[in-house]
Image (tube, helix red, strand yellow):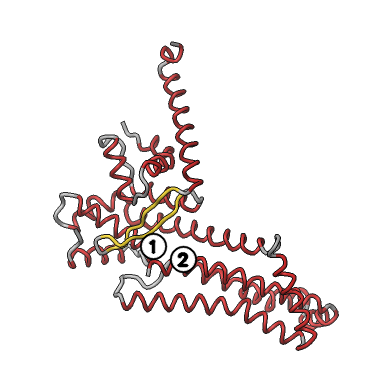
Amino acid sequence: MSLTTAQHDILVKYLKAVEIKHQEPFEEFYDHIATGFEKSHVLDLSTYIRDVAQPAFGGTKGMLKIVNEQNIIRKNMIWKRAKEIFFGLFGWPAIGFVMVSFMLIQFGAQQFGDRFIVLFSFGIGLVLPIFVVFYGLIRFYLHCKRQKLPYTSNNLNSWLLTAVNLPIALLNVGGSLVIPIFIGRDNFKIFLNAYPIVTVCLSTLFLLFGFTYLKLLKERFIFKLELS
Amino acid sequence: MSSSKLLKGSLATIVLKLLEENEKMYGYEITQRVKEITAGEFKITEGALYPTLHKLEAEGMLSTETQKVDNRIRKYYSLTKEGNAEAQTKVAELEEFLLNLHKLLNPKLGMG
């Protein structure tokens, strides 16, 4: 038995009022309350929500607490998996990929110059994953709009966006604060010119970040697309 | 007697045990199953159940799948291989604990 349109609207309005904005908790709470109401003898959904569902969840605060705890768990799961993928690159046989990347970067730096190779690896390693996440976000948003769903984002995508933005944020902090204040921009340029291997290592690191994020996104988007 | 505090510490074990017996379950179903088995003596609140389910999922004990039921998305939880092993360990631990607790509460039975 499905909820009537009027009952659906009441439940959606309630969940929105509680500020359940993301897909995952929205769907889980919606199904829980709807199933409970259908199996109860209460005739009015608003009464059921007020007298049964809300107290069982511990009120609005209780619902938001569940959402926040789930957010933390999801964030930790994403970081844990990202770390596993990244450090997995330094084990056998993935270390071969790292070595080949390093050699190609070194060869590229000799052929096309340091500036080109840094920009190239920055683009592939750090910018490309952001585009992939944005593609996922926009696709999900359009899907929700087309299906007239009561939410337009999901928790997983939000954390993935944070994750792919982190290296660029760190580079910004390093480039705008740490280097000018503690080392000096000119000194840093002299250092990079004196030790070209640093540029090669940094560029290889960008590529490894890119590989980590793209693999993570591939794994996580499978889940997201199944829901769509 | 209010058993909510005692129940809270055993919630993960209860969830794992129920999922060991049932291939997959959703949140509401778990609360109702507990109520049914204990004839309404144990009532799992949603505020306690969902954090437990999410934590077990993050620990790799549970896997999830979604299905469209009655025109809405339903999230089902099921045991992973690790979850299955953990369920057996946790149930055994709880049984041993209850046995010892029973001996403490009824010393005569313990000696007999």
Task: Locate residue B27, reporting x and y percent.
Answer: 34, 51
Are dots 1 and 2 in contact, CB under 8 Å?
Answer: yes
Q: Which of A161 and A49 is in front in this view?
A: A161
Question: Which chain letter matches label 2?
Answer: A
Q: Position of residue A132 (x, y in %)?
A: 52, 77
Q: Which chain carries label 1?
A: A
Indicate the amino acid at tag 1.
Glu
Residue extending furthest toward the bottom = A112
Residue A137: quadrant of the picture: bottom left
How many marks overall? 2
Give the mark nearest the N terminus, 1 or 2.
1
Q: Is residue A19 above or below residue A179?
A: above
Label number found at residue A24: 1
Q: Judge left or right: residue A168 versus residue A19.
A: right
Q: Name the residue: 44% across, 48% down.
A: B79
Quarter of the picture containing the N terminus of chain A is bottom left
In-image side of B61 versus B43 (left or right): right
What residue appears at the point 26 percent right and 37 percent down from the top-left corner?
B40
Q: Residue A156, which numbered label?
A: 2
Task: State the residue at coordinates (40%, 40%).
Answer: B17
Q: Is residue B12 left or right of residue A125?
A: left
Label of residue A95 in the image: none
The local secondary structure at tag 2 comes to helix
Question: Residue A170's spot in the image, x, y percent?
Answer: 64, 72
The residue furthest right is: A194
